[in-house]
Amino acid sequence: MDLTIRPRRLRGNPSIREMVRETRISSSSLIYPLFVREGSGIVEEIPSMQGQYRYSPDMLGKILEPLLQAGVNRVLLFGIPNVKDACGSGAWAADGVVQQALHFIKQNYPEIYCITDVCMCEYTSHGHCGILQDHWVDNDKTLEVLSKTALSHVQAGADMVAPSDMMDGRVAAIRGILDQNGYCQTPILSYAVKYSSSFYGPFREAAGSAPSFGDRKSYQMDYHNVREGLKEAALDAAEGADLLMVKPALSYLDVIHRVKTQTNLPLAAYSVSGEYAMIKSAANAGLIDEASIVCETAASIYRAGADILITYFAKELAGYINEGRIG
Ligand code: PBG
């Protein structure tokens, strides 16, 4: 057969396949989302997310040690307070659950880079991501509490803040308060392109943050849209975001790709709780091989354009990278 070009020449053995890889994945780009629950002595499995746990601040070593051992030293902290109220005041309490976790981590595991999720939904009695005016989340009032929360996280030791509320103008508001207080070096990772998604279901059970009425469609994005995502990304960049995020990941690979071509900021993708739970339950049912699917889906997210991956499988992925199974 007279074939000059034979693509299979580059697939003949593992050595050449690894050499010509177009997508490289490193543990330094992985972030592990971590649920911290107020109290002490708590390590409890999350029923909707098998293999994931809520930890009280004093028990965080139980997960941080194995993460560090695997080579993951970046976490995204979510707080679960004992008491919630209408304005979510636990979010910015100096002794709030995230603030306590930050003190614990900075004291005991200084090598861990701490990013905090800044949002009101885990702290409000109604479960919405901001301050309510009747049944409407009031944008500009919410900016005040988000800013206070971000400042309090940074004062407690956060290395980076990540607002996930989808209010208009939050990046500018947070940048402003951090700068006024001398934290002009603290970066903001904006959940810039966050869709109103059913893939968050298991998380809301984990964090007890489901809205008590209605949904989040008046602030999170409509999944039919991508140009609106580019608008959100451009706005957040102009307001001073240092990194951008697209969330969820797997059903939004086109969005990741489009945002990547538009921006020159580092781009994170968040593979959310529903993506995790779907893989776990299909693997448990014996329908798919978990490790292979975790590698293939992670590679697809990077291939689409993500520079950074936030995933509940961070520890496992770091292990697969170390084994040379992916990377
Ligand atoms: C807070 C927040 C949510 C998630 C991250 N930050 C829930 C939501 O918006 O309802 C979801 C993460 C996941 O599903 O893994 N607003």
Image (cartoon, rainbow, N blue to C red):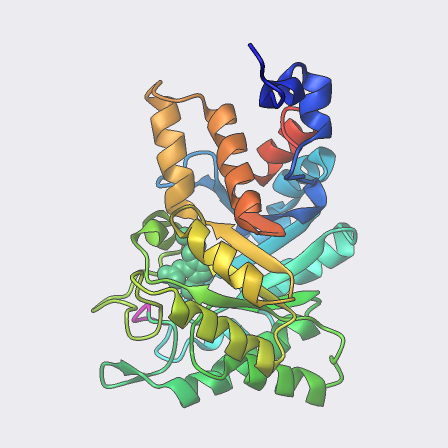
Range of residues picked out in magenta = 123-127
Q: Could you tell me which quadrant the C terminus lies in?
A: top right
Q: Position of residue 222 (x, y in %)?
A: 30, 66
As rendered, which of 183 and 78 lies closer to the eye? 183
Q: Residue 6 appears at what percent x and percent y? A: 60, 20
Residue that protrudes farthest toward the top in the picture: 1
What residue do we see at 21% from left, 69% from top?
Answer: 214
Q: Is residue 239 shown in magenta?
A: no
Q: Position of residue 174 (x, y in %)?
A: 59, 81
The residue depicted at 70 percent of the width and 85 percent of the height is 179
**Would you say 5 lies left or right of 223 here?**
right
Ligand 1, by image quadrant, is bottom left
Can you name the residue that lies furthest to the front here? 2
* Viewer can see residue 247: no
Majority secondary structure in the magenta region: loop
Quick check: 32 above or below 211? Answer: above
The answer to whether residue 215 is left or right of residue 269 is left
Frontmost residue, 5 versus 27: 5
Q: How many marks?
A: 0
Residue 317 lies, with reference to residue 98, above or below; the image says above
Query: Which quadrant of the rendered structure holds the N terminus?
Result: top right
Q: Is residue 125 magenta?
A: yes
Q: In terms of image quadrants, where is residue 236?
A: bottom right
Vertical order, 250 against 226 (above or below): above
Q: Residue at x 71, y 73 (%)?
A: 186
Q: Is residue 260 left or right of residue 114?
A: left
Q: Which residue corresponds to the image point at 75% horizontal and 50% vertical from the top-left?
A: 109
State which quadrant residue 158 falls in.
bottom right
Percent of width and height locating residue 147: 55, 82
Can residue 207 be seen here? The reply is: yes
